[in-house]
Amino acid sequence: MGEANLCSWLSGRRVFHETRFSTVRSMSTTVWTDGSCNVDGIAGRGGWAAIILEGGQTSEIFGYADGTTHNRMELTAVCEALERLKGSIEVRTDSRYVSSCFRDRWYDRWRLGNKWRTPRGLVRNRDLWERLLFLYEDATREVKIEWVKGHAKDANNNRADRLAGDAARRGSP
């Protein structure tokens, strides 16, 4: 997958980055991601966020998109984080949509004959799934995706949730 393909995924999306304390490099890393959509009645406006913990240093990234869905923002959060990282990475997400795909290997069925189908029709958000699978399978990363309960006692998951909601509300810096 070339650079042009990655750029096409980002076209039309507004992405904002805020790094606190350090830049992200390769090591063992934990990432919490979340997506949000239709916050405060703003139909189709979504936000995404990721908290990245590496070597005791934390960074936060976030962004938003118009004309989107909650699931697209969940996928975008994971993609945006992985694009910045190499090495061993544990992604913690409260999205069953994302975590179940990797736990149950849905993507194996989708790719059969390159048809990208489910029993109910075409796979939704194929562009983002292809982007995520490219990052997941890239030899420079060893990615583990874990589900965490949302709105519970995980402070970083709750922080990612707030950042995603704020990005959706704000829409621009």
Image (tube, grey):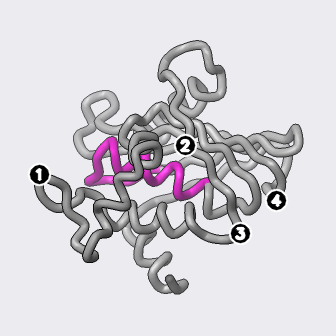
Q: Earlier in the sequence, mark 3 or mark 4?
A: 4
Query: Looking at this view, is 76 or 42 the one in front?
Result: 76
Q: Quick check: is 77 in the magenta stretch?
A: yes
Which residue is pictured at 14% across the width and 53% down the height?
A: 119
User: What separation in Å lies between label 2 and label 4 (alpha carbons)?
Assistant: 18 Å
* Residue 25 location (% of width, % of height): 82, 59
* Residue 94 location (% of width, % of height): 47, 31
The residue that disc 3 covers is 140
Q: Is residue 68 left or right of residue 34?
A: left
The residue that disc 2 covers is 49
Q: Main secondary structure of the magenta part?
A: helix
Which residue is pictured at 41% across the width and 52% down the height?
A: 105
Query: Looking at this view, is 95 or 19 the one in front?
Result: 95
Residue 25's disc is 4
User: What separation in Å lies between label 2 and label 1 (alpha carbons)?
Assistant: 30 Å
Q: Are marks 3 and 4 in contact (CB under 8 Å)?
A: no
Which quarter of the figure has residue 142? bottom right
Please report the bounds of the magenta region as a residue range.
64-81
Q: Is residue 16 left or right of residue 76?
A: right
Q: Residue furthest top?
A: 153
Q: Are marks 1 and 4 in contact (CB under 8 Å)?
A: no
* Residue 117 location (% of width, % of height): 20, 62
Q: Secondary structure at mark 1?
A: loop
Which residue is pictured at 71% across the width and 60% down the height?
A: 85
Q: Secondary structure at mark 3?
A: loop
Identity of the amino acid at label 1?
A: Arg
Q: Earlier in the sequence, mark 3 or mark 1?
A: 1
